[in-house]
Amino acid sequence: MRLLLVDDEKEFVATLAERLSLRGIEADWVTSAKDAEKIIKTEHYDLVLLDVKMPQVGGRELKKIIEKKIPGIKTIYLTGHGSEEDYQAGSAEAEYYLMKPININDLIEKINDALGKK
Amino acid sequence: MSNRIDPLGEAGLQFYSKVSASISHEIKNSLAVINESAGYLEDVTLMAKKGMNVDMDRLQSLAETMLKQVQRTNAIIKNMNRLAHSLDDPESQIDLNALLELMINLSERTTVTRGFKVFAALSDTAVTITTHPFFLENLIWLILDFAMNVTGDAKNIELKPAKAEPGATISFTGLEKLTQSEFNIFLTQRVHLMLAALNCTLQADENKGMITLNLPENITQPAS
């Protein structure tokens, strides 16, 4: 299982990746859509965890870009606090739509569940 | 329905709601960082109890991260509090430097998400006027929202307060794609009502890519 985490909050995404790694889950991280586009050119991932609200290119737009490169990749959205409209649209597009702060055990359960759907 | 709603009241509530949503998003982001840092501390504590080595430098950096996030959240809440108190008095004496600084902080998440950089060229001395702070903040928010549609490729907007005789001005520059016709579309009934409530005027200069807000020294007097 290999994950890519994309969130403009560097300290959040880096620490989350470390905590996943301690649990045996390999997770790379980047802080922008631009860097995500770059890394998926050379690396393969089973699931992406995307922050919905990021500068310039948000998670929902980035999901479409990643799917073109890695068809069938699973997605979990993360957000600070979105509108009801965001939640409805995001829930329909991704496997899960989670609100920050997250519980790591819940996240791992959702990751396993999403990948089990394959 | 709309006939029964005061347009200025509605605009004010929309502004306040948008800022509140943005602030809650920022606070949740900060809490998420603290949550992961605390979670990591919990993880390494468990590892240490099992006899594994702990990287003390990493622990120190986690503590620094958490302290930084507490300061960040404190600043966000201070700004929220300042905005809330701007409704206390319909007329109060304000320094435009401080008000613009507040507006840049409050709008930062929105402007950065849209890929813009808004900064203030603040004056060395206080630019003081007596006005309705909340309406002025609301008007600046609307002008910024419009300005983001007419900037150049650099996507930079500069806000500058200045003294004028007898009042003050706030200029918005970097609006390279500004046209008079688009500016006229921006001047909705709501904006006109806000300008009237603040007793001020708004001008666009296509050639300079600039909008200027002319404010009276006192809200009870018209702008020059």
Image (tube, coloured by chain):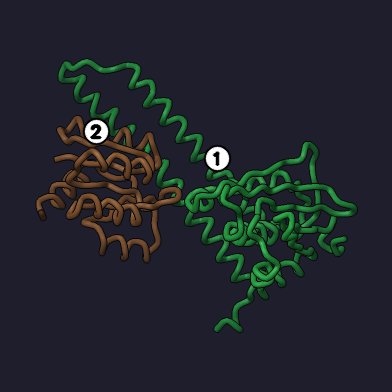
Chain colours: A brown, B green
Query: On residue B129, which mark appears?
Result: none
Q: Badge 2: how crowded within 10 Å, few (<14), some, or many (20+)?
A: many
Where, quadrant-wise, is the N terminus of chain A in this rendering?
A: top left
**B178 and B73: which is toward the camera:** B178
Q: Quadrant of the C terminus of chain A?
A: bottom left
Q: Looking at the image, can residue B80 be seen?
A: no
A44 relative to B144 in the view: left or right = left
Mark 1, chain letter?
Answer: B
- Tell me the kind of residue under disc 2: Arg
Q: Residue at x 63, y 47 (%)?
A: B102
Mark closer to the observer (2, 1): 2
Q: Chain of mark 2?
A: A
Residue B219 appears left or right of B54: right
Give SS at disc 1. Answer: helix
Q: Using the image as rendered, state which of residue B102 and residue B203 is in the foreground.
A: B203
Is B113 placed above or below B10 here?
A: above
x, y percent for residue A7: 36, 43
What is the quadrant of residue B41 in the picture?
Answer: top left
For label 1, the crowd category at 10 Å Cα-Cα, with few meaning under 14, some 14 to 19 and many 20 or more, is few
Q: Where does residue A37 sit, x and y in percent of width and height?
A: 32, 45
Which residue is pictured at 66% across the width and 57% down the height?
Answer: B140
Percent x, y of residue A44: 19, 41
Q: Position of residue A68 (x, y in %)?
A: 25, 54
Residue at image coords 61%, 84% = B3
Q: Which residue is mark 1?
A: B75
What residue appears at the point 45 percent right and 35 percent down from the top-left corner?
Answer: B69
Mark carried by residue A19: 2
Give the secondary structure at mark 2. Answer: helix
Relative to A49, is B135 above or below?
below
User: Quick check: do tags 2 and 1 share a chain?
Assistant: no
Tell me which amino acid carries mark 1: Ala
